[in-house]
Image (cartoon, rainbow, N blue to C red):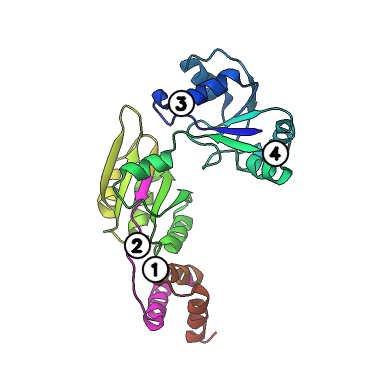
Amino acid sequence: MILLAATPIGNLGDASLRLRQTLEEAAVVAAEDTRHTIQLMRLLGIENRPELVALHDHNEHERAATLVERAATEDIVLVSDAGMPTVSDPGFRVVQLAAERGVPVSAIPGPSAVITALAVAGLPTDRFAFEGFLPRKSGERGRALAALAGEQRTLVFFEAPTRLAAALEDLAAAFGPGRPAAVCRELTKLHEEVRRGTLEELAAWAADGVRGEIVVVVGGAPAVEASPESALAEVQQRVTEGERLKDATRAVAAATGLSARELYAAALTARGA
């Protein structure tokens, strides 16, 4: 089978007994970074030296078939550098192909930066969406956020420390400066920090520079009751301010619960298209 094994996101004490036993007995381990996995096993006191196969973003498409073929007759343990494989880490293509070919897939649950940040952020946890890393370029990031502006679920993002300030500024511009949020830094590590505030406050704080592994949690948009006429006016205002019609209709539809298709058609009719 394919066995997805969650590894610590910082504190080695979070390594489960089952993870230790699995790595101690594994014959084949597919790892995001084999050097990192060797170091992890050494720090955990694991003496086993399994066959290590590199599986990362640049080679997963080519190696997935080989790993799934091998998994039909032997267990293949999948690990990423931290957390659960496939969650913004390599492994999805392997699992997808295994499912297509009827090869069993199981998991060793464990640390997750997404769930850990969500739990400590102090924002609603009953409904949430994980959006992974935002686009690197400001224009693309702005368009992506515009489409999410009306999302009423709590949103979780990964972000590089060098882009955090710019990302928070774009979040404030798209979602409004007063939207509540939290920046979770170095989770489970010695210098763990959870900074809570509005997007505007967090952007100002991050402007001086922030280090470490970052997870950003943002509160969802408040529910808005709107008529089709007021929603259309909001779309038209967004377009006037430079937003693409498609992005504007998606954002307003998400915020109001109206049909994006009908709102888009109404906007086209209003402009005489």
Q: Answer whether labels 2 and 1 touch (C-beta < 8 Å).
A: yes
Which residue is at a point 45% across and 25% down the rendered structure image?
A: 15
Residue 143 counted in the magenta span: no
Q: Badge 4: few (under 14), some or many (20 or more) residues near its Cα, within 10 Å? A: some
**Which region shows up in magenta?**
216-245
Q: Counting residues from the N terminus, which is met first, the one under dot 3 or under dot 1?
A: 3
Residue 63, given in percent of the width and then of the height, sits at 70, 35
Q: Mark 2: which amino acid?
A: Ala
* Discs 1/4, front: 4
Residue 133 in sight: no
What amino acid does circle 4 point to?
Val
Question: Which residue position is annotated with label 1?
Answer: 255
First reached walking from the N terminus: tag 1 or tag 4: 4
In this rendered view, identify the residue nearer to me: 133 or 6: 6
Marks 2 and 1, the one that precedes in the sequence: 2
Is residue 84 toward the left or the right of residue 201 in the image? right
Q: CA distance from mark 2 to mark 4?
A: 41 Å
Asked if residue 243 lies in the magenta stretch, the reply is yes
Where disc 4 sits, the SS reads: loop
Give the CA separation, mark 2 to mark 3: 37 Å
Give the mark nearer the N terminus: 2 vs 4: 4
**Mark sitting on residue 221:** 2
Residue 103: assigned label: 4
Coordinates of residue 11 in the picture (x, y in percent) = 39, 26
What is the spatial separation of the Cα atoms under label 1 and label 4, in whole angstroms?
41 Å
**Most foreground residue, 129 or 232:** 129
Q: Secondary structure at mark 2?
A: loop
Kindly check if marks 3 and 1 are in contact, taking CB atoms under 8 A apart as contact.
no
